[in-house]
Every structure is written in C-alpha cells, then in structure tokens.
Image (cartoon, helix red, strand yellow):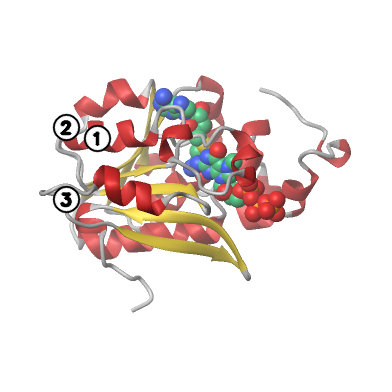
Amino acid sequence: MTVIPMENNHKLAKYWNQRYNLFSRYDDGIQMDEESWYSVTPEKIAKHIAKRFHKSLGSGHKVIVDGFCGVGGNLIQFALLSPRFRVIGIDISPEKLKMAKNNAQIYGVEHRCDFILGDFMDLVQTLDRIDALFVSPPWGGTEYQALKRYSLSHMTPNGFDIVRKCRKYNVDNIAFLAPRNVDLEEIRHELLVKDHPCFECEQNMVGKKTKTITIYFGDLIGADESE
Ligand code: MGP
Ligand code: SAH
C-alpha cells in the first residue's frame, strides 16, 4: 500500500482538509491511496444516493453492485443503509479492494459486502440478476475541471460504452456518478432510445458547492429521498 505523508503533500492538501467530509470515521483507520483522495464520493453524497436506491427498490432483499468501488465511499453507504442490501464491490485494483475491505470493517458492514477483483467491462455480463448498479468510473484525474463540457467518452472505460454494455446485458437500473461539467445534451443524444426514453440528473452539493452530478436510469428515476 502507498503511504502518503499527507502533512507535506501540497497536491492533496485540499483533500486532506476535507477528510471528514469523505469519511466521517477517518480517524478510526480509513485507508486511501493517492487516486482515492480525489475520487472518493463525499460521504453525504454517497449516503443520499444510497437512500434513493432504497426508496426506488422498496423493501425486501436487494443486490446492489458498485462497479468501480474504489476504497468504498459508496459501497459502505449502500451497506449501511439497509441490512437487506447485499452489496457487491468490483474494482480492477487489488490494493483498492484491500482498502475497501478495511474501510467497510471500520463502518461495521463488511459482512454485508462481497468484493470481486476484475474489469467491470468483462464482469458486466454476469450481472443480469442484480437489482441496481452504481458506477463511478475514473474521470481521467482532476484535469476534467478545465473542460467547458465533459464528454462521457473522455473516461476510461468510455462512459457511453459502460451504459450501452449494461443495457445489452439487461442491467437497466443504473446510477452514474459524473463530473459537474458533464455534457448532458450529449447524453440525451447518445443514450435516450425507445426503451429508455428518459434519465434524471441530480446536482450533488456539499455546502454551497456542486461536487458531482448523478445520472439515474431505469427504475432509479424519480425517487427523491427528501420527500
Ligand atoms: P474535485 O476535482 O476534487 O473537485 O472533485 P472539487 O473538490 O470541487 O475541487 P475544486 O478544485 O473545484 O475545489 C470533486 C469530487 O468529484 C471528488 O470529491 C470526488 O467525489 C469526485 N471525483 C473527482 N474525480 C477526479 C473523480 C474521478 O476520477 N472519478 C470519480 N468517480 N469521482 C471523482
Ligand atoms: N466511488 C468510489 C471511487 C471510485 S474511483 C469511492 O467513493 O470510493 C474509480 C475506481 O475505478 C478506481 O478505484 C479504479 O481502480 C477503478 N477502475 C478503473 N477501471 C476499472 C475497470 N475497468 N473495472 C473496474 N474498476 C475499475
């Protein structure tokens, strides 16, 4: 695991200052690597998304997949929300999965999580029986901020390919975490088709600042947890 002396790390200092927004239990032994510092979903946003899943999917046992789970920012909040949620976290990095397990343990939810090491684009075809999918792929570092409009095709894997491949294997209930400057018009053009005539996008704010935009597809559309 990469140990970063955070006190002297100028690049990551602003994330370090927000550490309790990322994980309120940071001091209990949360582990993150460099990429995770700028990629973890702030806890408040992750909790909100999890509540929306709960509201959309209803009661009963549900299987949720976090396709790019990283060190567990979203995975943990899904697992915390309901003892009836089984959460499968997929990531291509063994180091991140190890950290995600550690972090899930800190929040006391590791027994409700399974972890799969692999490429989401290969594993998606095994997911046809799940209830809902959350994806937060890498956006290509923090450089996304310089773009006027961010295309989902800038991501690796390509964000359009992710959604199209999911639909091909009948995974339709998807929430996609995108940058705040994402090109929604392009998404409308590329992803709205006869069987999928709409999507919902939601600005996620921490304080007065928009951090991310979550795009909901399928049955996840329209469940405002604040109602
Ligand atoms: P940020 O780039 O740190 O913007 O990302 P911020 O904090 O508004 O920076 P500022 O310079 O404008 O002050 C904001 C949030 O987006 C992060 O906390 C992460 O939750 C999410 N995020 C950022 N990146 C680069 C990624 C990424 O590559 N993948 C994913 N899934 N989320 C990311
Ligand atoms: N939502 C997470 C952060 C995700 S960052 C959190 O809050 O903690 C994006 C993650 O995608 C990284 O951990 C990276 O290792 C993983 N990743 C990149 N390409 C992947 C692929 N093809 N399949 C699965 N995971 C991938």
Q: Residue 4 at what x, y percent from top left?
A: 77, 31
- The mark that comes first in sequence, 2 or 3, is 2
Q: Amino acid at mark 2?
A: Lys
What residue sits 46% from the left and 27% below the top?
156
Neighbor class of circle 1 (other Cα within 10 Å; few <14, some 14-19, many 20+) is some
Q: Are marks 3 and 1 in contact (CB under 8 Å)?
A: no
Which residue lies under the disc numbered 2?
168
Q: Provide residue 18's location: percent of width, then percent of height.
A: 71, 54
Tell me, yes or no, whether the two marked residues, 2 and 1, touch with CB atoms within 8 Å.
yes
Query: Which corner quadrant of the image does residue 130 belong to?
Result: top left
**Label 3 residue SS:** loop
Q: Is residue 77 left or right of residue 175?
A: right
Residue 69 visible? The answer is yes
> Disc 2 on helix, strand or loop?
helix
Quarter of the figure with the C terminus: bottom left
- Image quarter where the N terminus lies is top right
Q: CA distance from mark 3 to mark 1?
A: 11 Å
214 vs 105, nearest the viewer: 214
Q: Which residue is mark 1?
A: 164
Residue beneath disc 3: 196
Whole-number angstrom distance, CA of label 2 to CA of label 3: 12 Å
Q: Give neighbour class at mark 3: few <14, some 14-19, many 20+ (Cα, 10 Å).
A: few
| CB-based contact (under 8 Å), mark 2 and mark 3 | no
For residue 172, which quarter of the picture? top left
Judged by depth in the image, the label closer to the viewer, 2 or 3, is 3
Q: What is the x, y in percent for residue 127?
A: 21, 32
Residue at x-position 26% and y-position 28%: 124
Q: Is residue 33 visible?
A: no
Q: Earlier in the sequence, mark 3 or mark 1?
A: 1
